[in-house]
Image (cartoon, grey):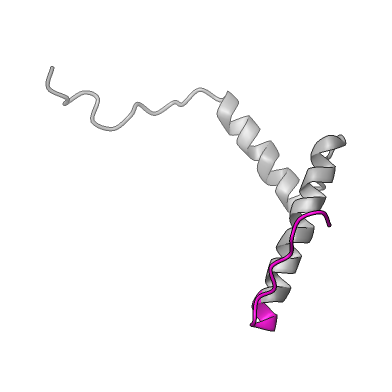
């Protein structure tokens, strides 16, 4: 690593900091490549449901529209 490493006196905190450094390096590498996140089946179903729901026009009027003072 080219950057200066600060060592924390608490080894647990230092371990966490090291992990975050590795995560940032990984993110930087993935940003340069075409990164395709892998979704679980449940996540795919949820995403598909959100897409379907966003395409449907809402059939119920928003609450309070009729009684709103002009």
Query: Is 69 rendered above or below residue 12?
Result: above
Residue 23 or 47: which is nearer the viewer? 23
Viewport quadrant of the C terminus: top left
Quadrant of the rendered structure where residue 11 is? bottom right
Q: Residue at x 59, y 24 (%)?
A: 55
What residue occupies the far left of the structure in this picture? 69
Q: Position of residue 26 (x, y in %)?
A: 81, 51
40 displayed left or right of 53: right
Q: Position of residue 52 (x, y in %)?
A: 63, 31
- Residue 41 colored magenta? no
Residue 41 or 22: which is nearer the viewer? 22
Q: Residue at x 82, y 54 (%)?
A: 2
Q: What's the magenta bit mostly, secondary-structure-wise?
A: loop
Residue 1 or 13: which is nearer the viewer? 1
Quadrant of the rendered structure where residue 1 is? bottom right
Q: Which residues are magenta?
A: 1-13
62 displayed left or right of 55: left
Q: Residue at x 84, y 36 (%)?
A: 32
Query: Is 20 rendered above or below residue 60?
Result: below
Quadrant of the rendered structure where residue 66 is? top left
Q: Position of residue 17 (x, y in %)?
A: 69, 67
Query: Is 25 rendered above or below residue 69?
Result: below
Q: Position of residue 8 (x, y in %)?
A: 65, 76
What residue occupies the far right of the structure in this picture? 33
The answer to whether any part of residue 40 appears in the image is no
What residue occupies the far front of the structure in this picture? 4
The answer to whether any part of residue 12 appears in the image is yes
Image mark count: 0
């Amino acid at each position: 690593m080219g950057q200066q490493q600060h060592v924390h006196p608490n080894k647990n905190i230092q371990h966490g900091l090291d992990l975050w450094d590795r995560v940032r390096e990984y993110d930087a590498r993935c940003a340069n490549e075409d990164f395709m996140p892998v979704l679980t089946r449940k996540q795919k179903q949820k995403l598909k449901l959100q897409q379907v729901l966003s395409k449907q026009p809402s059939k119920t009027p928003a609450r309070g529209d009729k009684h709103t003072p002009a």
